Image (cartoon, grey):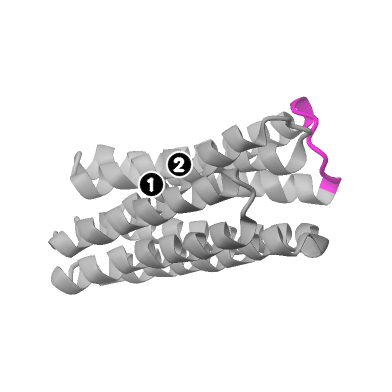
């Protein structure tokens, strides 16, 4: 893997730390700018990684689409911080873009191991668990959004199951391990985000830090799985 990938991953970490620090200080606009820079950096990791080692073209293309959808999702959620009037609409649009990103990622995993019944069962179970938990946590969501969130979490569980399947079928290769850890980080990050957005939580700074501290590793690791192929 090119050393430039490590440099870009480090830049993502630096920009993410700046974003977290500024968000904790209530500087939403400045934090948003660093969030965009961090998102641009993790997209670059996949592009640079593939350019130095052009293997698994379909995997690269699909993961790149996933990362780009994540970038646009970041833009929408970043705008939310400076335009709270449109918060609800921007959250839904952000959720849509991230969902498209996860679907592209799943398609990338399919190119490696196909689709197995067990992984589909895990995805369905994850959606059911999410539907139940929104009620247990008393999240302030209507029925439609609750169903959308359940489908979204089903995609996250499906990603973890398929990444695990890649390791089982093709061996504990670095690319597959990073993809699995990425999926787990996404699940943690989005769980923090869901609690932050839809419950009456008091200590928001802790959740913001936890969400961003797992989100960027998730994206960087996914991008690096391309470079490690």
Instruction: Locate residue 217 relative to residue 226 in the image: left or right.
Output: right
Residue 120 visible to an observer of this rendering: no
> In x, y percent, where is residue 53?
14, 68
Which residue matches tag 2?
A: 214
Q: What element carries label 2?
A: helix
What count of labels does the image hold?
2
Main SS of the magenta segment?
A: loop
Q: Give the range drawn in magenta.
A: 135-143
Which residue matches tag 1?
A: 217
Instruction: Locate residue 6 relative to residue 121 in the image: left or right.
Output: left
> Could you give the CA–CA distance between mark 2 and mark 1, rounded to whole angstroms?
5 Å
Instruction: Kindly indicate the quadrant of the structure image that contains residue 30.
Output: bottom right
The one of 113 and 133 positioned closer to us in this rendering: 133
What quarter of the picture does the C terminus occupy? bottom left
Residue 51 visible to an observer of this rendering: yes
Instruction: Locate residue 117 relative to residue 89 in the image: left or right.
Output: left
Do the CB atoms of the residues marked 2 and 1 lie less than 8 Å apart?
Answer: yes
Label 1 Cα crowd, 10 Å radius (few <14 / some 14-19 / many 20+): many
Q: Is mark 1 on a helix, strand or loop?
A: helix
Instruction: Locate residue 151 relative to residue 13 in the image: left or right.
Output: right
Give the vertical position of 99 relative to 184 (above or below): below
The one of 104 and 15 positioned closer to us in this rendering: 15
| Residue drawn where x is 27% and y is 41% of the image | 177
């Amino acid at each position: 893997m090119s050393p430039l990938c490590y440099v870009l991953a480090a830049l993502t970490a630096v920009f993410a730390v700046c974003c977290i620090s500024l968000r904790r200080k209530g500087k939403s606009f400045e934090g948003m700018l660093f969030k965009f820079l961090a998102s641009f950096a993790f997209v670059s990791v996949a592009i640079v990684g593939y350019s130095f080692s052009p293997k698994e073209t379909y995997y690269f293309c699909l993961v790149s689409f996933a990362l780009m959808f994540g970038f646009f999702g970041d833009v929408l959620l970043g705008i939310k911080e400076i335009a709270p009037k449109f918060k609800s609409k921007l959250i839904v649009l952000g959720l849509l873009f991230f969902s498209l990103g996860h679907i592209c990622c799943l398609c990338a995993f399919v190119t490696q191991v196909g689709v197995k019944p067990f992984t589909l069962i895990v995805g369905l179970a994850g959606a059911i668990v999410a539907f139940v938990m929104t009620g247990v946590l008393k999240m302030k969501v209507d029925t439609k959004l609750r169903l959308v969130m359940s489908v979204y979490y089903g995609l996250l569980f499906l990603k973890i199951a398929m990444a695990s399947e890649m390791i089982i079928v093709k061996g504990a290769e670095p690319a597959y391990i990073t993809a699995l850890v990425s999926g787990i980080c996404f699940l943690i990050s989005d769980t923090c985000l869901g609690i932050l957005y839809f419950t009456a939580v008091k200590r928001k700074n802790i959740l913001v830090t936890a969400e961003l501290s797992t989100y960027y590793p998730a994206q960087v690791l996914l991008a690096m799985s391309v470079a490690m192929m």
